[in-house]
Amino acid sequence: QKEVEQNSGPLSVPEGAIASLNCTYSDRGSQSFFWYRQYSGKSPELIMFIYSNGDKEDGRFTAQLNKASQYVSLLIRDSQPSDSATYLCAGSTGSARQLTFGSGTQLTVLP
Amino acid sequence: DAGVIQSPRHEVTEMGQEVTLRCKPISGHNSLFWYRQTMMRGLELLIYFNNNVPIDDSGMPEDRFSAKMPNASFSTLKIQPSEPRDSAVYFCASSLRGAGETQYFGPGTRLLVL
Protein backbone atom coordinates (compact mmCIF):
# COMPACT_ATOMS: atom_id res chain seq x y z
CA GLN A 1 0.00 0.00 0.00
CA LYS A 2 1.33 3.40 -0.96
CA GLU A 3 1.67 5.82 1.91
CA VAL A 4 -0.25 8.55 0.11
CA GLU A 5 -3.11 7.61 -2.19
CA GLN A 6 -5.08 9.84 -4.53
CA ASN A 7 -8.10 9.16 -6.67
CA SER A 8 -6.29 9.08 -9.98
CA GLY A 9 -9.11 10.50 -12.04
CA PRO A 10 -9.15 11.95 -14.55
CA LEU A 11 -11.65 14.44 -13.19
CA SER A 12 -13.61 16.78 -15.41
CA VAL A 13 -15.73 19.67 -14.16
CA PRO A 14 -17.47 22.51 -16.02
CA GLU A 15 -16.15 26.03 -15.68
CA GLY A 16 -17.48 27.71 -12.56
CA ALA A 17 -18.09 24.45 -10.71
CA ILE A 18 -16.37 23.19 -7.56
CA ALA A 19 -13.62 20.64 -8.11
CA SER A 20 -12.99 18.24 -5.25
CA LEU A 21 -9.69 16.38 -5.01
CA ASN A 22 -9.10 13.76 -2.36
CA CYS A 23 -6.12 12.09 -0.77
CA THR A 24 -5.69 9.49 1.98
CA TYR A 25 -2.57 8.58 3.91
CA SER A 26 -1.49 5.58 5.92
CA ASP A 27 1.10 7.04 8.32
CA ARG A 28 -0.78 8.31 11.37
CA GLY A 29 2.34 10.20 12.39
CA SER A 30 2.22 12.41 9.31
CA GLN A 31 2.02 16.00 10.43
CA SER A 32 2.07 18.22 7.37
CA PHE A 33 0.35 17.99 4.02
CA PHE A 34 0.85 19.82 0.79
CA TRP A 35 -1.03 20.29 -2.45
CA TYR A 36 1.03 20.94 -5.56
CA ARG A 37 -0.19 21.75 -9.04
CA GLN A 38 1.73 20.51 -12.06
CA TYR A 39 1.01 21.71 -15.56
CA SER A 40 1.99 19.39 -18.38
CA GLY A 41 5.72 19.57 -19.00
CA LYS A 42 6.31 21.81 -15.98
CA SER A 43 7.51 21.31 -12.42
CA PRO A 44 5.24 21.01 -9.39
CA GLU A 45 4.32 24.30 -7.75
CA LEU A 46 2.90 24.70 -4.27
CA ILE A 47 -0.74 25.65 -3.90
CA MET A 48 -1.29 25.17 -0.18
CA PHE A 49 -0.06 23.40 2.90
CA ILE A 50 -2.03 22.39 5.97
CA TYR A 51 -0.90 21.16 9.38
CA SER A 52 -4.00 21.38 11.57
CA ASN A 53 -7.32 19.60 11.49
CA GLY A 54 -10.05 21.56 9.77
CA ASP A 55 -10.19 23.88 6.82
CA LYS A 56 -7.70 26.35 5.44
CA GLU A 57 -8.78 28.79 2.77
CA ASP A 58 -6.70 30.74 0.29
CA GLY A 59 -8.67 32.52 -2.39
CA ARG A 60 -10.55 29.97 -4.46
CA PHE A 61 -8.73 27.09 -2.80
CA THR A 62 -9.68 25.32 0.43
CA ALA A 63 -7.63 22.53 1.95
CA GLN A 64 -9.28 20.22 4.45
CA LEU A 65 -7.50 17.88 6.85
CA ASN A 66 -9.09 15.16 8.95
CA LYS A 67 -6.41 13.35 10.94
CA ALA A 68 -8.84 10.92 12.55
CA SER A 69 -9.95 9.66 9.15
CA GLN A 70 -6.52 10.21 7.59
CA TYR A 71 -7.65 12.17 4.60
CA VAL A 72 -6.82 15.46 3.00
CA SER A 73 -8.84 17.22 0.34
CA LEU A 74 -8.56 20.24 -1.89
CA LEU A 75 -11.59 22.16 -3.08
CA ILE A 76 -11.31 24.56 -5.99
CA ARG A 77 -14.24 26.96 -6.19
CA ASP A 78 -15.29 28.70 -9.40
CA SER A 79 -13.02 26.41 -11.42
CA GLN A 80 -11.35 27.98 -14.43
CA PRO A 81 -9.88 26.36 -17.54
CA SER A 82 -6.49 27.58 -16.29
CA ASP A 83 -6.92 25.23 -13.31
CA SER A 84 -6.60 22.27 -15.65
CA ALA A 85 -3.51 20.43 -14.43
CA THR A 86 -2.40 17.47 -12.37
CA TYR A 87 -2.75 17.97 -8.62
CA LEU A 88 -0.30 16.20 -6.35
CA CYS A 89 -0.97 15.53 -2.69
CA ALA A 90 2.06 15.08 -0.43
CA GLY A 91 2.42 14.15 3.21
CA SER A 92 5.41 14.17 5.52
CA THR A 93 6.11 10.51 6.24
CA GLY A 94 8.91 8.23 7.25
CA SER A 95 11.61 8.61 9.85
CA ALA A 96 12.99 11.79 8.30
CA ARG A 97 9.49 13.19 7.62
CA GLN A 98 10.33 13.62 3.96
CA LEU A 99 7.45 14.28 1.61
CA THR A 100 5.78 11.31 -0.02
CA PHE A 101 3.75 12.22 -3.08
CA GLY A 102 0.57 10.63 -4.32
CA SER A 103 0.28 9.64 -7.95
CA GLY A 104 -1.68 12.78 -8.79
CA THR A 105 -5.18 13.58 -10.04
CA GLN A 106 -5.57 15.04 -13.49
CA LEU A 107 -8.19 17.79 -13.53
CA THR A 108 -9.77 19.21 -16.64
CA VAL A 109 -12.02 22.26 -16.41
CA LEU A 110 -14.27 22.44 -19.44
CA PRO A 111 -15.14 25.91 -20.81
CA ASP B 1 14.94 35.86 -6.19
CA ALA B 2 16.13 33.07 -8.38
CA GLY B 3 14.44 29.77 -7.83
CA VAL B 4 16.04 26.36 -7.96
CA ILE B 5 18.28 26.11 -11.00
CA GLN B 6 18.89 22.87 -12.83
CA SER B 7 21.08 21.99 -15.77
CA PRO B 8 20.92 20.70 -18.36
CA ARG B 9 17.21 21.08 -19.11
CA HIS B 10 17.32 18.27 -21.64
CA GLU B 11 19.77 15.44 -22.04
CA VAL B 12 19.85 12.74 -24.68
CA THR B 13 22.51 10.10 -24.32
CA GLU B 14 23.27 6.57 -25.30
CA MET B 15 23.11 3.57 -23.05
CA GLY B 16 26.31 3.10 -21.11
CA GLN B 17 27.27 6.76 -21.03
CA GLU B 18 27.73 8.76 -17.85
CA VAL B 19 25.14 11.41 -17.12
CA THR B 20 25.60 14.26 -14.65
CA LEU B 21 22.69 16.43 -13.56
CA ARG B 22 23.30 19.66 -11.68
CA CYS B 23 21.30 21.68 -9.20
CA LYS B 24 21.65 25.01 -7.43
CA PRO B 25 19.18 25.35 -4.56
CA ILE B 26 17.53 28.57 -3.45
CA SER B 27 20.01 30.66 -1.48
CA GLY B 28 19.57 30.16 2.25
CA HIS B 29 17.79 26.84 1.95
CA ASN B 30 19.54 24.09 3.86
CA SER B 31 17.69 21.05 2.51
CA LEU B 32 17.95 19.66 -1.01
CA PHE B 33 16.04 16.83 -2.65
CA TRP B 34 16.43 14.86 -5.87
CA TYR B 35 13.27 13.34 -7.35
CA ARG B 36 12.55 11.25 -10.41
CA GLN B 37 9.20 11.38 -12.19
CA THR B 38 7.85 8.82 -14.64
CA MET B 39 4.36 8.04 -15.83
CA MET B 40 4.51 4.59 -14.29
CA ARG B 41 5.93 5.43 -10.87
CA GLY B 42 5.01 9.07 -10.37
CA LEU B 43 7.25 11.36 -8.34
CA GLU B 44 9.80 9.44 -6.29
CA LEU B 45 12.31 10.79 -3.81
CA LEU B 46 15.81 9.60 -4.65
CA ILE B 47 17.90 11.32 -1.99
CA TYR B 48 17.62 14.08 0.59
CA PHE B 49 20.45 16.29 1.89
CA ASN B 50 20.34 18.46 4.97
CA ASN B 51 23.19 20.92 5.53
CA ASN B 52 25.06 19.20 2.68
CA VAL B 53 24.88 15.80 4.40
CA PRO B 54 22.90 12.93 2.85
CA ILE B 55 20.10 12.03 5.26
CA ASP B 56 18.06 9.50 3.31
CA ASP B 57 19.26 7.80 0.15
CA SER B 58 16.91 4.84 0.35
CA GLY B 59 15.25 5.91 -2.88
CA MET B 60 18.42 5.67 -4.95
CA PRO B 61 17.60 2.81 -7.30
CA GLU B 62 21.00 1.14 -7.44
CA ASP B 63 24.73 1.66 -7.34
CA ARG B 64 24.71 3.24 -10.75
CA PHE B 65 23.22 6.33 -9.13
CA SER B 66 25.25 8.64 -6.91
CA ALA B 67 24.67 12.12 -5.54
CA LYS B 68 26.92 14.70 -3.96
CA MET B 69 26.52 18.06 -2.34
CA PRO B 70 29.98 19.58 -1.94
CA ASN B 71 28.64 22.89 -0.68
CA ALA B 72 25.40 24.65 0.17
CA SER B 73 24.88 25.98 -3.34
CA PHE B 74 25.56 22.99 -5.56
CA SER B 75 24.57 19.36 -5.94
CA THR B 76 25.04 16.72 -8.60
CA LEU B 77 23.23 13.50 -9.45
CA LYS B 78 25.29 11.10 -11.52
CA ILE B 79 24.19 8.01 -13.38
CA GLN B 80 26.99 5.71 -14.54
CA PRO B 81 26.42 3.73 -16.67
CA SER B 82 23.06 4.98 -17.89
CA GLU B 83 20.33 2.62 -19.09
CA PRO B 84 17.14 3.22 -21.12
CA ARG B 85 15.02 2.63 -18.02
CA ASP B 86 16.62 5.69 -16.44
CA SER B 87 14.73 7.88 -18.90
CA ALA B 88 12.61 10.22 -16.82
CA VAL B 89 12.32 13.79 -15.61
CA TYR B 90 14.66 14.48 -12.71
CA PHE B 91 13.67 17.29 -10.38
CA CYS B 92 15.74 19.02 -7.76
CA ALA B 93 13.91 20.78 -4.92
CA SER B 94 14.98 22.74 -1.88
CA SER B 95 13.39 23.77 1.39
CA LEU B 96 14.32 26.30 4.02
CA ARG B 97 14.94 23.98 6.93
CA GLY B 98 13.89 20.39 6.53
CA ALA B 99 12.13 17.57 4.78
CA GLY B 100 8.64 18.20 6.13
CA GLU B 101 8.48 21.77 4.92
CA THR B 102 7.44 23.40 1.69
CA GLN B 103 9.70 22.29 -1.11
CA TYR B 104 10.38 24.45 -4.15
CA PHE B 105 11.05 22.60 -7.34
CA GLY B 106 13.43 23.39 -10.14
CA PRO B 107 12.36 23.15 -13.80
CA GLY B 108 13.64 19.59 -14.11
CA THR B 109 16.00 17.76 -16.44
CA ARG B 110 14.38 15.61 -19.10
CA LEU B 111 16.66 12.63 -19.63
CA LEU B 112 16.36 10.26 -22.54
CA VAL B 113 18.70 7.29 -22.68
CA LEU B 114 18.72 5.57 -26.05
Image (spheres, coloured by chain):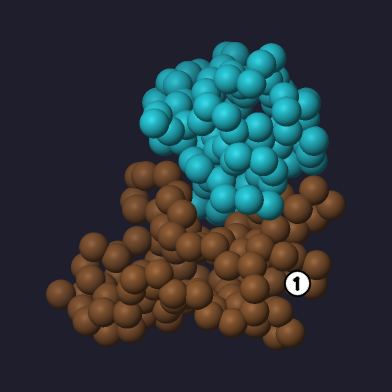
Chain colours: A brown, B cyan
> Residue B50 versus residue A59: which sits nearer the camera?
A59
Q: Quadrant of the N terminus of chain A?
A: bottom right
Look at mark 1 in the image and give the residue it sits on. Answer: A26
Q: In this view, does A97 lie to the left or right of A71?
A: right
Q: Is residue B31 depicted above or below A16 in this figure?
A: above
Q: In which quarter of the image is the C terminus of chain A?
A: bottom left
Q: Which residue is drawn at 58% across and 20% down?
A: B73
The answer, for residue A47, to whether it is visible in the render is yes
Q: Is residue A39 left or right of residue B28?
A: left
- What crowding class fits label 1: few (fewer than 14 Cα within 10 Å), some (14-19), or many (20 or more)? some
Q: In which quarter of the image is residue B45?
A: top right
> Residue A109 versus residue A46: which sits nearer the camera?
A46
Q: Mark 1: which amino acid?
A: Ser
Q: Is residue B14 depicted above or below B54 in this figure?
A: above
Q: Quadrant of residue A49?
A: bottom right
Q: Residue at x 71, y 32 (%)?
A: B49
Q: Is mark 1 on a helix, strand or loop?
A: loop
Q: Residue at x 68, y 52 (%)?
A: B100
Q: Residue at x 47, y 31 (%)?
A: B4
> In the image, residue B89 lies at what x, y percent?
49, 38
